[in-house]
Amino acid sequence: MGTLEDYSKIRRKERSKDDAWIRAFLARAGFGTMATVQGGQPFLVTRNFAYDEAAHAIYMHGAKKGRTYDRAKEAPQVCFSASEMGRLLPAKRAMNFGTEFGGVVVFGRLRVVEDPDEAKHGLQLLLDKYFPHLKPDVDYEPITDIDLNVTAVLRIDIASWSGKEKKAPGDFPGAFTFDDLKASGSR
């Protein structure tokens, strides 16, 4: 069994990204998927999230019961991933077809945020990320203690991470997006 640093190593070094790229990616990624383990069985859950650069942590919200909430209390080791798909890259040989992509993998510990001020901070980060055009006390009521009674705020304290990206030249022959396929009716 390796260390978290071992798990974060990227085989294709030319695709490895630095910490600044990882922070920027986590700021723009629409959602992420978190893996936990219960009784030897891995589980995945996809969630909205907000990266807090100052705390070097990821905040999410959820129910105050259920598998994720229980894992935070009983087995807090997690792996979290956020990714995005770029263009599809055709080739002359089937084995050379490819896809542009970007992604981040995080290893850390999940915990339930108990401090009300930190919980409100985590929820506000989520609101600011997904609804930046709306403001508390102007467009909606600010987060209250009553909200915290029914909503769990979860935090991943990041121990290790890695970022990876594959990009082809802009004029790559025949490159197209998955959305182009859907728009053309090919799917």
Image (cartoon, rainbow, N blue to C red):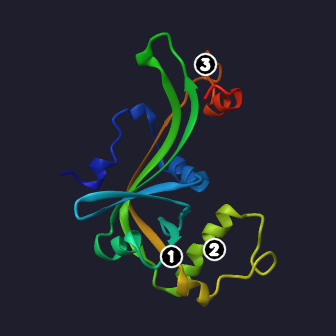
131 vs 32: above or below: below
48 vs 73: above or below: above
The answer to which of 149 and 19 lies nearer the viewer is 149
User: Label 1, on which residue?
Assistant: 153
17 vs 39: above or below: above
Helix, strand or loop under label 1: strand
Residue 158's spot in the image, x, y percent? 41, 62
**Which dot marks residue 172?**
3
Residue 88's spot in the image, x, y percent? 56, 27
Helix, strand or loop under label 2: helix
Residue 87's spot in the image, x, y percent? 59, 29
Labels 1 and 3: the sequence-earlier one? 1
What separation in Å lies between label 1 and label 2 (alpha carbons)? Answer: 11 Å
Amino acid at pointer 2:
Gln
**Which dot marks residue 33?**
none
Amino acid at pointer 1:
Val
Can you tell which quarter of the image residue 89 is in? top right
Say few, some or many: other residues with alpha carbon within 10 Å of mark 3 (under 14 / 14 to 19 / 20 or more). Answer: few
> Depth-wise, is mark 1 or mark 2 nearer the camera?
1
Q: Quadrant of the C terminus?
A: top right
Say few, some or many: other residues with alpha carbon within 10 Å of mark 2 (under 14 / 14 to 19 / 20 or more). Answer: some
Labels 1 and 2: the sequence-earlier one? 2
Amino acid at pointer 3:
Phe
Q: Residue at x 70, y 26 (%)?
A: 184
177 vs 160: above or below: above
Say few, some or many: other residues with alpha carbon within 10 Å of mark 1 (under 14 / 14 to 19 / 20 or more). Answer: many
- The outermost residue toward the top is 92
User: Label 2, on which residue?
Assistant: 124
What separation in Å lies between label 1 and label 3 (alpha carbons)? Answer: 44 Å
